[in-house]
Image: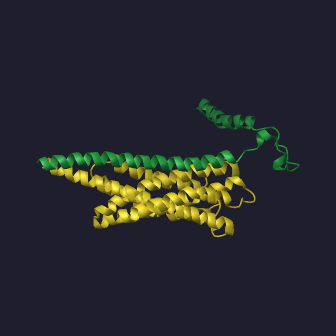
Amino acid sequence: MKKTVLLLVVLTLLPGAVLGARQPAQPPATQEEFVPVGALPQSEQLPAAPLVIGAYAFVWVALMVYVWSLWRRMAKLERELADLQRRVQKQ
Amino acid sequence: MSRVFVPLVFVALVLFASAPLVVANAPFEQTMGLVQKIFYYHVPSAMLMFVSAFVCGIASALYLFRRSAVADRVAVAAGELVVLFGLIVLVTGPLWARKAWGVWWEWDARLTSSLLLWMIFVAYLLVRRFGGPGSEKLAGAMALFGMANVPFVYVSVNYWRTLHPKTSVVMTLTPGMRGAFWFCVAAFVALYVLLLTVRKRLEDRRATVEQLYLATEE
């Protein structure tokens, strides 16, 4: 019984102790100044042009693929329809 | 039908091909700059996703309560277009967000509810494709559920705290932006009507083929 109680106490306290150990000792430093976006190094600036071009290209490609899939499905159905009509006429 | 179809193709192509030029001439937004131009394709796609969900839901209701086979074919066509325009919204949105918010995705009310709406209609198409005989009724009920979800997606930005711009953004556009935006809306609407017409025609052909199969079996 004592062993079970001891085990429960350890299991209850252990996760808290582990999480406490993982917490950073120091809070992040307070921001002391604002940096204009133009003063950022080139590596930290995210260019907008690839995102805009990507978005517009995706719209065009998605619509083209959909139109192509419609055309393909329609052509397949037309072939099937012509074949069936021939079979019905023979009967 | 063909008398309307050919001019519709012409109008849709002209409008859609000239839309990028109109967008390029629209003024840049003050804080977001170039990346805000995604708005001109993103928002009309979202509008048509909502419209198509309503078309699919109303057509499904007509099929469920009046047994209209034509309405069922319109519902399938509109359901597929919800998925197409929803995909455009869900891809162009994160591309815009990456620059504007610094993240590709945020699990806020508008983005999550839009994703759920899209997934409902993906499920609708999967049920129709793989559900077997009689799955039209189940799919119809799903479309009604999807349609009921649309108003919640629309107003979500006004009721919950979210990074997404509110619905009032469209009404407060400056004249230069407003013209380009409504031009793109017109282009997308023309394209939507064209795609819906062609997709519905595909379903008409499929129904004819099924009838002929039945005739040959008899």
Q: Give the residue drawn at x 66%, y 36%.
A: A15
Q: Is residue B194 at least partly visible in the picture? A: yes
Q: Is residue B159 at least partly visible in the picture? A: no
Tell me the shade of chain A.
green
The N terminus of chain A lies in which quarter of the figure? top right
Point out the residue furthest to the left here: A91
Quarter of image, res A50: top right
Which colour assignment does the render follow? by chain
Tell me the shade of chain B.
yellow
Q: Nearer the viewer, residue B14 or B179?
A: B14
Q: Position of residue B198 (x, y in %)?
A: 38, 56
- The answer to whether residue A28 is left or right of residue B194 is right
Q: Is residue B61 above or below residue B127?
A: below
Q: Is residue B155 above or below residue A73?
A: below
Q: Position of residue B137 (x, y in %)?
A: 32, 57
Q: Give the residue drawn at x 85%, y 44%.
A: A29
- The answer to whether residue B149 is left or right of residue A45 is left
